Amino acid sequence: MKLRSTETFWPLISAMNISYPSIDSDITTEILIIGGGITGALTAYKLINEGKKVALVDRRDVCNGSTAASTALLQYEVDIPLHELIKIRGEKCAVDSFKNGKKAIFDIRQIIDDIKSDCGFEFKKSIYFTSYKKDIPLLKNEFKTRKQHLFDVSWLNKYELEKLGLKAIAAIESKTAAVMDPYRLANDLLKYCQDKGMQIYDRTNVTSIQTQKGKCIAHTENKFTITAEHVIHCTGYESTETLEEKVVDLKSTYAIASESLTEIPDILKNAVIWDTSSPYFYYRATPDNRIIMGGGDEDFVDAKKRDKLIPKKEVFLMRQFKRRFPDFAFKLDYSWAGTFGETKDGLPYFGKPNPKKNEHYLLGFGGNGITFSVMGINSIMDSINNKRDLDLEYYRFDR
Ligand SMILES: Cc1cc2nc3c(=O)[nH]c(=O)nc-3n(C[C@H](O)[C@H](O)[C@H](O)COP(=O)(O)OP(=O)(O)OC[C@H]3O[C@@H](n4cnc5c(N)ncnc54)[C@H](O)[C@@H]3O)c2cc1C
């Protein structure tokens, strides 16, 4: 018997930190942020601390888009290996992008300390491994390139990996990575900004934006307007609704979480790990000793079709786990699916697609979505202030 549909009021309301009202009058502000996920929350934090007058709206309850689905491995390695990214975007942009990601991990730690968020942030190593002989040349090339550009990496062989509990044949270990709970952090950031005077409206859908006499006028579905000097779109994968150009290939992705285990593989105590498969599999642990793993991407976004596959993907991912960790049992507790997107060069998009409009975008697409969002908050500030910024060049729309 199916006693109820998937989401009901009481469990949801007790899991929610705080809920915000929907908009019920026309308002005027200096900056409007559309989207209350981790990107909107980080952007709001930056702007509020710069003394700006900010309003933020979200069409759902805040933090219930991709941020609620994220597995939140924070890595500086982008989805495309450095040696390949150099070929696509040139040495300076590729190496700077890796360095920017590394800095973003320390920056987010500072933000978390500043607002005293209890979001389970922990520094980890990042281990990029292979289980296939055919991928050894790729891994070696990547190791050499990262060393050459002074990234702090070591090579791990089969025996070292097996000692750590992972069945694989070689890996690159990077010293800087982290994990956290992104839903908690985004909620804590929004609360911090509200306490500092930011207006937040959830269940408020922006349906169109007009430019009139240099101002942006956003229209909401319930027929109110928000007038602002600047609009920042932090709308994640739903930005495809408002962008004219196609900048991202959308897919479906899957994740599973185990029960709290008495023992987890040593490698997951200190590291997040991911492999050379395409699409790749990735694994992390939580502070309460659960293992989260993900992968199994599919090239479609239809939500019904995607969610129907969840039971099959559970079996698929658990089989993959068993192959890598034959000595550990993965006791499944949760599974979920989400929309995910990849850009051609694995890098984000920051800035104004149309220079004539004061509409800015901060789109941290891909497996590094969160670190990209941290990187983007300074660039968005520069975009608003019309200041030159190298990242606005690297990650511009017409690249
Ligand atoms: C399964 C999965 C695993 C992932 N793992 C990682 C990982 O390990 N590491 C990592 O860095 N990233 C990961 N990501 C990506 C990461 O989660 C995203 O990049 C990040 O959450 C995006 O945050 P966001 O705030 O930009 O988007 P969202 O959280 O989707 O927020 C955007 C918000 O905009 C609102 N919105 C959209 N349009 C409108 C409108 N017109 N009016 C009002 N509101 C609107 C939406 O309701 C939504 O709440 C993963 C994603 C998934 C799905």
Image (cartoon, helix red, strand yellow):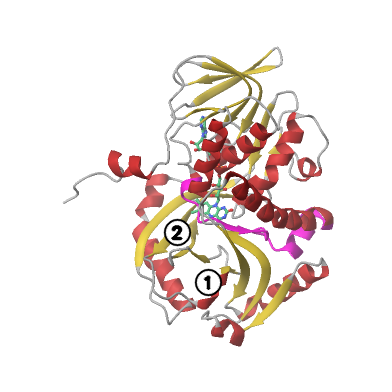
Name the residue located 81 percent from the left edge and 44 percent from the top edge.
390
Q: Is residue 90 magenta?
A: yes
The residue beneath circle 2 is 255
Q: Mark 2 belongs to which amino acid?
A: Ala
Name the residue located 52 percent from the left edge and 25 percent from the top edge.
206
Q: Position of residue 391 (x, y in %)?
A: 77, 44
Q: Is residue 290 magenta?
A: no
Residue 346: in sight, yes or no?
Answer: no
Most extreme residue toward the top is 213
Tag of residue 269: 1
Mark 1 neighbour density, 10 Å: few (under 14) some (14–19) many (20 or more): some
Mark 2 neighbour density, 10 Å: few (under 14) some (14–19) many (20 or more): many
In-image side of 133 versus 94 (left or right) = left
Image: magenta residue range: 67-91
- In this picture, is 157 found above or below 103? below
Secondary structure of the residue carrying numbered label 1: helix
Q: Position of residue 395 (x, y in %)?
A: 73, 44
Name the residue located 44 percent from the left edge and 24 percent from the top edge.
22
Q: Position of residue 68 (x, y in %)?
A: 46, 47
- In this picture, is 98 found above or below 187? below
**Which quarter of the figure has residue 241?**
top right
